[in-house]
Amino acid sequence: MISFKSDPTFYPSPKSAMRGKPEDLAYVACLYEGTGIERPDHIAVVDVNPSSPSYSKVVGRVELPYIGDELHHFGWNACSSALCPNGSPGVERRYLVVPGLRSSRLYIIDVKRDPRNPEIVKTIQPQEIMEKTGYSRLHTVHCGPNGIYVSAFGNGEGEGPGGILVLDHYTFEVLGRWEIDRGDQYFSYDFWWNLPNEIMVTSEWGVPNTIEGGLKLEHLKERYGNRIHFWDLMKRKKVQSLTLGDENRMALELRPFHDPTKTMGYVNVVLSLKDLSSSIWLWYKEGGKWNAEKVIDIPAEKGDGGLPDVLKGFGMIPPLVTDIDLSLDDKFLFVSCWGAGEVRKYDVSDPFHPVLAGKVKVGGIPRHPHPSGKEMSGAPQMLEVSRDGKRVYVTNSLYSSWDNEFYPDGMKGWMIKLNAEDGLTLDKDFLVEFGEARSHQTRLSGGDASSDSYCYP
């Protein structure tokens, strides 16, 4: 008799995942693009076990072989979706799938042999990806039940359409472009799904030629997206699109509810052309149609000097909500305000009426210091919530050319931890600094709130 032993970090439901072993390590994307330093990016390994003698220290790293990748979002080769009825047998959470946003290169990094000293086991060059998919500028990675999905901003000329490509679970071979019928979808950014209901959702930022050189105000109205798209996951066909307000631009992070019986989720809109506010929208299915409703509005603040050039004509500090993350029990939404230097926590027990449940200030254009007294460059950007919902790990870089525009005095990478068990407080004893490297995506050992999807409620 042949039997397979399931990976112990795979969980059939969000509730069971919340009871799992806490994370011991965090893997952090560190990059040098925009710093003036000609050096390859790396993945830093941070000890996040409070009982460890090396707690809050960098304990390992894997250096990449090329300069100019600009690491951004990365993910696992396999996760809890493998337990779905159409999941792949025998896979394990062993490899980090790490894309270069500027280079369009993909690295497969083994963390099982020595979790503190990962090693690159395969590199997929951009030429192969272009030849098989027509896509470039790779962004988000999600582990599906039957393959590894990677989003891309555009084509080889730096225009659109952007979309999604798929890798084989076992060989990491590039299989091809995912979309069969995309309709009028052109801009691309994030994607995620509700697997049992066979739904995929995608969002919009812009094409590489628009975003790579930094924010140009003349591009805001026409060259940045403000829609989300709903797809038949099995037919790979777009079925509906929603515009999130004509005045809004940059619909970024998609956070579907983890409970697969709930066909709803959140998306953040970075900027309103009307008043520089940011907003959070709830998307949901009702009566066979998709709808979206603005449920959180975060206004801009009056600037009192010290504004970067890109904002001086406005005299205001936009919140710039650039990331959101939803706890596994679908009760709390965490929101990063990269302009204002703030992280917010909302109680979303009633999804249509979020209630502010806590906030902390650190970094930002107004420059709020760390509780240790340390001056903080940049601001809270990427958020990663632990499976039990008690800890939030925060890093500070958005995108190299945009970092330099909004924080022209320079940015050095850091990572902080917020305690979210009761309200939201900043852990004064946890501060990881990455020197001249900037820090972006974090992945937690064993999975986190934005790495896994589930097929059982």
Image: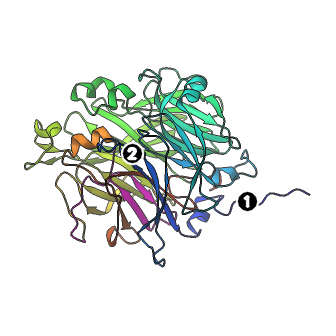
Depth order, front residue of 74/249: 74
| Magenta highlight on residue 396 | yes
Q: Residue 6 has which mark? A: 1
Residue 161 in view (yes/no): yes
Q: Give the vertical position of 293 relative to 110 (above or below).
A: above
The earlier-in-sequence mark between 2 and 1 is 1
**Magenta residues: mostly which secondary structure?**
loop
Pointer 2 with pointer 1, Cβ within 8 A: no
Element at badge 2? loop
Residue at (26%, 52%) from the top-left corner?
378
Q: Where residue 189 sits in the image (x, y, percent)?
A: 44, 35
Of badges 2 and 1, nearer the viewer stands: 2
Residue 349 in view (yes/no): no
Q: Residue 39 has which mark? A: 2
Query: Dividing the image into 4 quarters, which one contains the N terminus?
Result: bottom right
Q: Residue furthest right?
A: 1
The amino acid marked with disc number 2 is Arg
Q: Where residue 21 sits in the image (x, y, percent)?
A: 58, 70
Q: Give the vertical position of 225 relative to 168 (above or below).
A: above
Which segment did they paint magenta? 372-398
Q: Where residue 83 sits in the image (x, y, percent)?
A: 70, 53
Q: Where residue 294 sits in the image (x, y, percent)?
A: 34, 42
Is 222 situated left or right of 178 in this image?
left
The amino acid marked with disc number 1 is Ser
Element at badge 1? loop
C-alpha distance separating marks 2 and 1: 39 Å
Q: Give the vertical position of 333 relative to 249 (above or below).
A: below
Is 274 situated left or right of 353 in this image?
left
